Amino acid sequence: MRDDPVKASRDAFLRRALLLALSVFLVTSASAQPSQQAPQASQPATSPTPAIPPSGEPVLEPRAIDILKASSSRLAAARTMSFTAVASYESPSRFGPPLIYTTRAAVTLQRPDKLAVITPGDGPATEFYYDGKTMVAFMPAENLVAVAEAPPTIDAALEAAYHSAAIYFPFSDVVVADPYADIAKGLELAFYIGQSRVIGGTKTDIVAYASHGVFVQMWIGAEDKLPRMARAVFRDDPLRLRHQVEFSSWKLGVAVPAGVFTSARAASAKPIPFASPDPTPMPAGGTPSKDK
């Protein structure tokens, strides 16, 4: 009997996701694609970055930069923050056209040294806790936990989690201490597109920028300066697969209930190494968005 290719493709994806999750805790994202080898494009792909003006000078529109800086300042000033992030990413199918997969995460942080990320699905459920001293990656369904010592800031902990265990969150750019500073280090392009009243249920300013080899289109609240959606394409991706994160339920400067950054259930789970499921070492220096 011939295998159903659609079912085989779906089952292969689920097996791969579970294997990665059991190995430790790999958060799929707009920047972390599945381990499947992507098929070669039939024709060479062009860069997703818009054309450079005839003068050869990069486009860095002040209005776009001002919007990015205002959003960064609003996020950086918040001592506490919580939001919901729904990440969608494309993955090549056996038939060629990409399929889209999604994850949803509830994020809570307290600057400078506390972060909790609860990801119930799609895919294996995961929980991540950081309290300024340790990082905990917990798989509640499998009752597995990985624990490691952690550096004293959220930024450093995110980088350590990525390089030591391939843990990456697609919303990392909005929780670091200075979001614009990370963008500015490799900023090649920035321009203003216009406004929308559709995304996020509010009026947003739409900007686009290219930094560290990633082209991003972003919707930012015109009044509150909070991100509502970001779409990204990696310049070196021959298939130009799209990655997207939608942000909602923003709460800034609100008291965080006790116990958010720890888990009693995780403390009693079966321990496994805090290590990458992929034997290939993670790139040294920089975040995933800079090294992919």
Image (cartoon, rainbow, N blue to C red):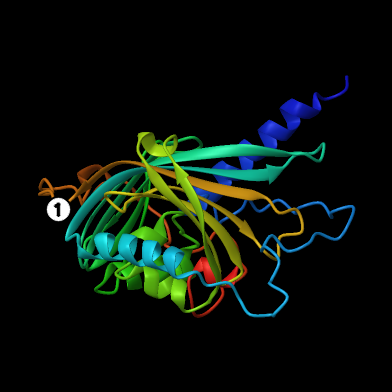
In the picture provided, is 200 more to the left or to the right than 132? Answer: right
The image shows residue 289 at horizontal and vertical percentages of: 53, 66
Q: Residue furthest front?
A: 55
In the picture provided, is 14 more to the left or to the right than 39? Answer: left
Looking at the image, which residue is at 29% across and 74% down? 151
Q: Based on the displayed image, in which of its 4 quarters is residue 189 positioned?
A: bottom right
Looking at the image, which residue is at 45% across and 63% down? 64
Q: Is residue 112 above or below residue 239?
A: below
Quarter in which the N terminus is drawn: top right
The image shows residue 205 at horizontal and vertical percentages of: 42, 50
Looking at the image, which residue is at 59% across and 64% down? 214
Q: Residue furthest top?
A: 1
Looking at the image, which residue is at 32% across and 51% down? 226
Quarter in which the C terminus is drawn: bottom right
Q: Is residue 197 above or below residue 252?
A: above
In the picture provided, is 86 more to the left or to the right than 280? Answer: left
Mark yes or no: residue 69 visible.
yes
Q: Which residue is nearer to you in this view: 261 or 234? A: 234
What is the total number of numbered labels drawn onto the structure image? 1
Name the kind of residue labelled 1 in the image.
Gly
The image shows residue 114 at horizontal and vertical percentages of: 22, 60
Within 10 Å of disc 1 (Cα), the crowding (few <14, some 14-19, many 20+) is few
- Residue at numbered disc 1: 253
Q: Based on the displayed image, in which of its 4 quarters is residue 233 positioned?
A: bottom right
Q: Is residue 152 above or below residue 75?
A: below
The image shows residue 130 at horizontal and vertical percentages of: 27, 60
The secondary element bearing badge 1 is classed as: loop
Mark yes or no: residue 160 visible.
no
Q: Which residue is nearer to you in this view: 252 or 279? A: 252
